[in-house]
Amino acid sequence: MNHLTFQYKHVANFLSEEEILLMQEEIDTCHSLLVEKAGKGNQFLGWMDLPSKTDESLLQSIEADAKSLRERSEIIVVVGIGGSCLGARAIIEALVSPFSTFENSLGKPSILWAGNSLSQDYHADLLNLLDKKEYSIIAISKSGTTMEPAIAFRLLKNHIEKKYGVEEAANRIITITDGSRGALKSLSEKHGYKTYCIPNDIGGRYSVLTPVGLLPVAAAGFDIRQLITGAHQMQKICTGTSSILDNPAACYAAIRNSLYRMGSQIEILVNYEPRLHYCTEWWKQLFGESDGKENEGIFPAGADFTSDLHSLGQYIQEGQRILFETVIHIQKPKRGLSIPFNEANIDGLNYISGKTLHEVNDMAALATTLAHIEGEVPNLDIVLPILDEHALGELIYFFEFACGLSGYLQGTNPFDQPGVEVYKNNMFALLRKPGFENDTEAIKGLIAGE
Ligand code: PA5
């Protein structure tokens, strides 16, 4: 079986192999901190051994619940935000046909998402659709108190109980939350929902290989065992050696931080496959919440090429020289499609007739990389043999491990996210949540001025 590879040939104009290898000593130190669980945030390193420790009984239980939900649903609504949504969405949207929502049926449900915004219209439209569909709910929140999913779950619980009655509704709801605390845990106990626990030592953005990701992925009909096997494969490589030349995550962490120290403040994760859009969203959260601290950190941005070459392409080619790109390539598409020959050739495309669309996409990628290198944008490449569960498992673990190493290279704690509380406290104060009424001077001023 082919595996994920990380390549740095397109960085050669900016960083020599000797310069990359100068990072080895620092990488060794950070690698030890991570694998020996001796660094900052070491109480949140449960994700590191997850692939090797995933229990057969947990997998069987998830597969059985997924099957049961699928049989009774045309739609499964996954409620969650941030780390309680993006990982599952990244995997499912990478694997599912973009047109599957037009073909859903009992036994072959579509996965839809709720509680990842406060949009009134989105949630009202969703409830309208659910009036007409057989459905069930997977509600995910580690804290059990996050505003967006809590509101969505209240709306959906209300809807599903009216539609099926309280008893049947309880059979159609599965929750994933903390083992002992939080409102979702209390609701689950009160109503007897089947519940999976999120381990205490795993933070939201590193939780995709727990039931948080596994149950929605299984419910979408995909092979969670292959996902875990792929992640386990990468776990062995990443934890087994700190050598920049043998550990792709160490190599990626070393290069992205070298580039950062040379002034590249923004990393753009690029794909040439629209199905990877949510992989980028997951990656943005992983690196954004892990790196961005103490006025430091690489800003993680995303681009879907070739589409975004027609929008962001100009800036990348000629804007501020503070960018580098990490490009995900898929070697082999799952479906065949060639460009047909046309006698009249009015569109002038006969010069590529007989080529597959994938071959043209590959040439677009190479042409773009060469142009961007010329425009002084270093490029890194991640190559996946094919877009399947195994490859996605490898990719997830690769990024998680590189992210941990990167945080330690920057001297920060890659496993906390203190900054995200600030807006929440303001919002609670503005909404008059008991205990938050006058939280900051700015909010006091606003409330006083009403
Ligand atoms: O990474 C994180 O910790 C966050 O993005 C959380 O996953 C997100 O805020 C959702 O939190 P919760 O699962 O507690 O509802």
Image (cartoon, rainbow, N blue to C red):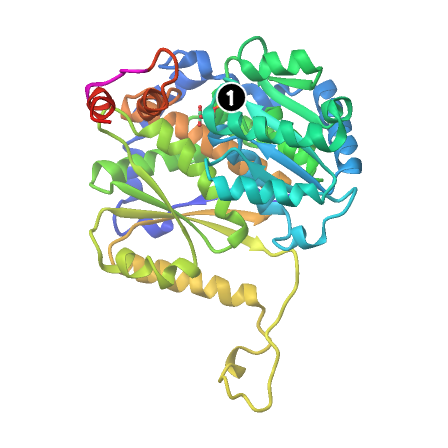
Q: Is residue 389 visible?
A: yes
Q: Identify the main secondary structure in magenta.
A: loop
Whether residue 398 appears in magenta in the rendering, the answer is no
Say if the magenta span includes residue 438. yes
Taking the image as shown, residue 29 lies to the left or right of residue 346, namely: left
Task: Report which residue position mark 1 lands on.
Answer: 48
Image-quadrant location for residue 424: top left
**Residue 284: percent from the left, percent from the top?**
40, 38
Q: Position of residue 329 (x, y in %)?
A: 49, 52
* Residue 181 higher or lower than 430, as above or below: above
Residue at 58% in and 21% down: 50
Image quarter (top left, top right, bottom left or bottom right) of the N terminus:
top right
| Residue lying furthest front | 450
Magenta extent? 437-441
**In the image, residue 275 above or below residue 197:** below
Kindly identify the residue that appears in the image at 47 percent across and 20 percent down.
203
Q: Quadrant of the C terminus?
A: top left
Q: Amino acid at mark 1?
A: Met
